[in-house]
Image (tube, helix red, strand yellow):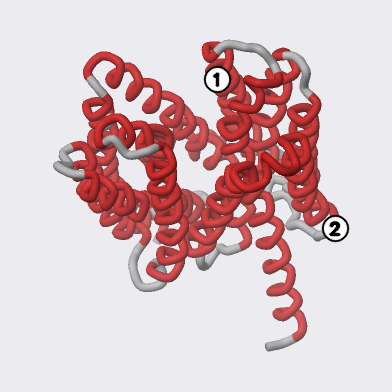
C-alpha cells in the first residue's frame, strides 16, 4: 500500500468518526425533549397540550431542514453546514438549561429541530459518499451511534438527576454536542459534488425517478414503525399486561438495544447478502414480530416480540439509504433530502394515528398500525427489487 492510499484511508476514518459523533448528538436530540419534560413541568407551568406542541414544533423544524440539507451539501459541501448544525444543537441545549418561560422552551425546540435535522441528513449523506464500495455496512454502523446518543440522556437523568440536577445534565449534553463541531472544524472534507453549479435538468431526473419515491415511501412506513413502537410499546405493556413502568422501560431499552445490535450485525451481513434481500428479510421478521405483539397471549411473548421487532427494524432504514446512495451517487444529498422528508412525514403520522385508534378502540388495536406498515414495506420492497434489476441493467 502506497503512502497516498494510506493517507486516503486515514482521511475516510477521520470523516467517519466525525459523522458518528454527529449522529450520536442527533440521538441526544431525539431523546432530549421526552426525557426532560417531567422536570420542565416542575420548573415551568404549562399544559400537556402545550407539551405536545413542542414535539410538533421540533418535527416541523426537522421537516424544513430535510428539504434544505440535500441541495446545500451537494452544492456547497459538508463542512460549514455541519458546523452550523452542531452549533444550533449546542445553543438549543443552553436555552433548555436556562429556560424560565414556555416561549423559551418553544424557541429551544425549534432550534434543536433545525440543528438535529441537519446533523441527521448531513452525516448520512457524508457516510454514503465516503464509502462508495460499502455504503450499507457504513450506514448501518453509523446508525448504532444514534442509539447510543438516544440512550445517553435518559440514562444520565436516571442516575444523576437527584445528585446534580437537570441544569448540570443539560450542560454536560451541551459539552457533548460541541464534540462534532470541533471534529467538523479541524478535518478536511471532500469538495462539493456540484461545485460548478446546480444542473437542474439532471436533478429533475433524479427527483422524478420511481426508485427514489418507492424508497421514500418504504421509509415513510418504516419511520412510522420506529416512532410508533418506540413511543407506545411501554404503554401497551403497562396497560395491557400490568407491567410496572420500570419493567416496561427495561423492555423498551431492550427494543433499542436490539436495534443497535441488529445494525452492528447488519454491517457484517451486507458483505454476503444483497441490500434489497436484507431489507426484505428484515421486513418479514418485523411483520412476524408485530403480529406477535398485538396477538400475544402473555407478557413473555409480547416481550420477545418487542426484542424481535427491534432486530427486524435495525437494517431497514440505513440499508434503504444505501440503495438510494448507490443508485444516485452524484446527487446523494438531494436524493436523501427527498426521502427524509417523506420518512419524517411517516414518523409524525403513524404515532398520531396509533393514539387515535388506542383512544377509540384500545391500545392493542392501535398497535395494528405497525402490522399494516410492515406489510406495506414488504410489498414496496418487492417492487423495488424489480425496479433495481431494471435500473442496474439500464446503467450497464
| Outermost residue toward the front in this view | 163
Residue with the mark numbered 2 = 186
Q: Quick check: 48 above or below 62?
A: above
Within-10-Å neighbours for mark 1: few <14, some 14–19, many 20+: some
Between 389 and 9, the residue placed more toward the observer is 9
**For the N terminus, which image quadrant?**
bottom right
Q: Quick check: 394 above or below 302?
A: below
Residue drawn at the location 45% of the way across and 49% of the way down:
253
| Location of residue 153 (image quadrant) | top right
**For the C terminus, which image quadrant?**
bottom left
Q: At which x and y percent is residue 242?
A: 28, 35
Within-10-Å neighbours for mark 2: few <14, some 14–19, many 20+: few
* Alpha-carbon span between mark 1 and mark 2: 35 Å
- Residue 133 in the figure: left or right of residue 243: right
Residue with the mark numbered 1 = 56
Q: At which x and y percent is residue 312?
A: 32, 53
- Residue 296 in the figure: left or right of residue 306: left
Residue 152 visible to an observer of this rendering:
yes
Amino acid at each position: 500500500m502506497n503512502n497516498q492510499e494510506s493517507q486516503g484511508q486515514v482521511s475516510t476514518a477521520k470523516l467517519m468518526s466525525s459523522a458518528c459523533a454527529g449522529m450520536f448528538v442527533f440521538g441526544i436530540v431525539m431523546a432530549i425533549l421526552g426525557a426532560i419534560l417531567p422536570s420542565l413541568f416542575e420548573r415551568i407551568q404549562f399544559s400537556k397540550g402545550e407539551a405536545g406542541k413542542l414535539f410538533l414544533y421540533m418535527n416541523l423544524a426537522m421537516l424544513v431542514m430535510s428539504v434544505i440539507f440535500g441541495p446545500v451539501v451537494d452544492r456547497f459541501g459538508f463542512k460549514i453546514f455541519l458546523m452550523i448544525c452542531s452549533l444550533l444543537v449546542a445553543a438549543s441545549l443552553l436555552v433548555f438549561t436556562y429556560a424560565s418561560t414556555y416561549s423559551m422552551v418553544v424557541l429551544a425546540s425549534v432550534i434543536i429541530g433545525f440543528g438535529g435535522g441537519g446533523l441527521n441528513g448531513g452525516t448520512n449523506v457524508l457516510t454514503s459518499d465516503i464509502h462508495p464500495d460499502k455504503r450499507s455496512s457504513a450506514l448501518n454502523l453509523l446508525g448504532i451511534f444514534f442509539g447510543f446518543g438516544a440512550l445517553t440522556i435518559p440514562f444520565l437523568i436516571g442516575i444523576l438527576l437527584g445528585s446534580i440536577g437537570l441544569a448540570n445534565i443539560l450542560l454536560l449534553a451541551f459539552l457533548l454536542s460541541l464534540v462534532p463541531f470541533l471534529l467538523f472544524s479541524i478535518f478536511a472534507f471532500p469538495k462539493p459534488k456540484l461545485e460548478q453549479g446546480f444542473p437542474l435538468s439532471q436533478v429533475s431526473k433524479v427527483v422524478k425517478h420511481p426508485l427514489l419515491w418507492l424508497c421514500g415511501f418504504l421509509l415513510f412506513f418504516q419511520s412510522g414503525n420506529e416512532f410508533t413502537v418506540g413511543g407506545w410499546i411501554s404503554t401497551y405493556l403497562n396497560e395491557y399486561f400490568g407491567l410496572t413502568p420500570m419493567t416496561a422501560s427495561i423492555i423498551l431499552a431492550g427494543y433499542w438495544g436490539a436495534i443497535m445490535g441488529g445494525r452492528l450485525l447488519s454491517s457484517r451481513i451486507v458483505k454476503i447478502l444483497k441490500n434489497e434481500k436484507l431489507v426484505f428479510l428484515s421486513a418479514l421478521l418485523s411483520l412476524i414480530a408485530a403480529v406477535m405483539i398485538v396477538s400475544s397471549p402473555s407478557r413473555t411473548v409480547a416481550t420477545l416480540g418487542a426484542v424481535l421487532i427491534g432486530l427486524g427494524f435495525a437494517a431497514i432504514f440505513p440499508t434503504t439509504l444505501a440503495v438510494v446512495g448507490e443508485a444516485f451517487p452524484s446527487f446523494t444529498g438531494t436524493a436523501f433530502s427527498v426521502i427524509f422528508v417523506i420518512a419524517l412525514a411517516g414518523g409524525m403520522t403513524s404515532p398520531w394515528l396509533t393514539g387515535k385508534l388506542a383512544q377509540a378502540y384500545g391500545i392493542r388495536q392501535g398497535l395494528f398500525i405497525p402490522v399494516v406498515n410492515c406489510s406495506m414495506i414488504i410489498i414496496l420492497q418487492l417492487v423495488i427489487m424489480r425496479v433495481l434489476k431494471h435500473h442496474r441493467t439500464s446503467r450497464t
